[in-house]
Amino acid sequence: MPKYAANTTMLFQEHDFLDRFDAAGKAGFQFIEYMFPYPYDAHELRAKLDQNNQTQALFNLPAGDWAGGDRGIAVQPSRQDEFREGVGKAVDYAAVLYKDVQGPKLVNVLVGKAEGDEAITRRTVIGNLQYAADKFADAGLTLIIEPLNPYDVPGFYLYGTQNTLNLIEEVGRENVQLQYDFYHMQRVEGRLTQTVRENLDKIAHIQLADVPGRHQPGTGEINYPFLLAELDRLNYKGYVGLEYIPEGHTEDTLGWLKELKTS
Ligand SMILES: O=C(O)C(=O)[C@@H](O)CO
Ligand SMILES: [Mg+2]
């Protein structure tokens, strides 16, 4: 069975952020992911993980002004210094959050919304990702890149699996892989099972939510019992992050996972 991680940016919002570790622990989660650790002291976050016997599964590079609409800044030539500062910050947090962690040490780099000349944008994003990948390699980290969907994030630079794999190939670093989010990719292109079968070796992390509402599995059109069983059939060893908007109280949206564990 894949290792299921609670995404505490989305789940357990009934609690303050620091209390979500305990709530996730009570619900049985051993693995935790969230977007941004940066408003908190890294040691405080690590203490919450340790108190609950939890392991950090994933966090994101600083992504610019989120409230102002940024979804990463790697494509923006005018913000290269800010991008590099963010890389340093992520490496510092990883040193604490991933200390002594066995297995993948993942940092998701959202590439951002493209602006201006395509050739300059491409050069910028490749250069930035190479810079980050090299710093991450020194720190034992894997950089992962996630395509999103254009309905939720208009103007984002990366929408499809193949576009993302092309970018990864162009970056040309061994520690750069794909973050495959079933929710976004169902909205963009479908072919979820086929894509995972064909690209398992390039996928370092998976996230889930149902379509169209981005709620828990069972609320939409994706056949999660089949898809998650397929990850077992393929012997997928990575995490599956529960990155959905709970329809109801978070604890009441986990029935599908309990069923999976007992079946
Ligand atoms: O929006 C998503 O999907 C995510 O995975 C966020 O963490 C942004 O990376
Ligand atoms: Mg995602």
Image (cartoon, helix red, strand yellow):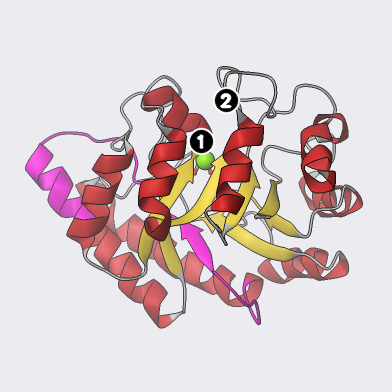
* Magenta residues (range): 98-126
Looking at the rendered image, the quarter that the C terminus falls into is top right
Nearer to us of marks 1 and 2 is 2
Question: Compared to 187, does 95 lie above or below?
Answer: below
Amino acid tagged 1: Phe
Q: Is residue 68 visible?
A: no
Please state which of residues 141 and 182 is positioned toward the viewer in this rendering: 182
Question: Compared to 11, does 218 lie above or below?
Answer: above
184 relative position to 81: left or right? right
Q: Please state the horizontal and vertical placement of residue 1, each as a whole percent of the image.
A: 68, 55
Quarter residue 100 falls in? bottom right
- Residue ID for mark 2: 222
236 relative position to 12: left or right? left
Marker disc for residue 62: none
Please state which of residues 179 and 3 is positioned toward the viewer in this rendering: 3
Q: Please state the horizontal and vertical placement of residue 130, each as a whole percent of the image.
A: 25, 65
- Residue ID for mark 1: 182
The residue under the point 38% across, 26% down is 188
Q: Please state the horizontal and vertical placement of residue 116, each as a whole percent of the image.
A: 15, 34
Asked if marks 1 and 2 touch (Cβ < 8 Å), the reply is yes
* Label 2 residue SS: loop
Question: Compared to 240, does 149 lie above or below?
Answer: above
Total numbered labels placed on residues in the image: 2
Please state which of residues 37 and 6 is positioned toward the viewer in this rendering: 6
Quarter residue 236 falls in? bottom right
Question: Compared to 259, does 31 lie above or below?
Answer: below
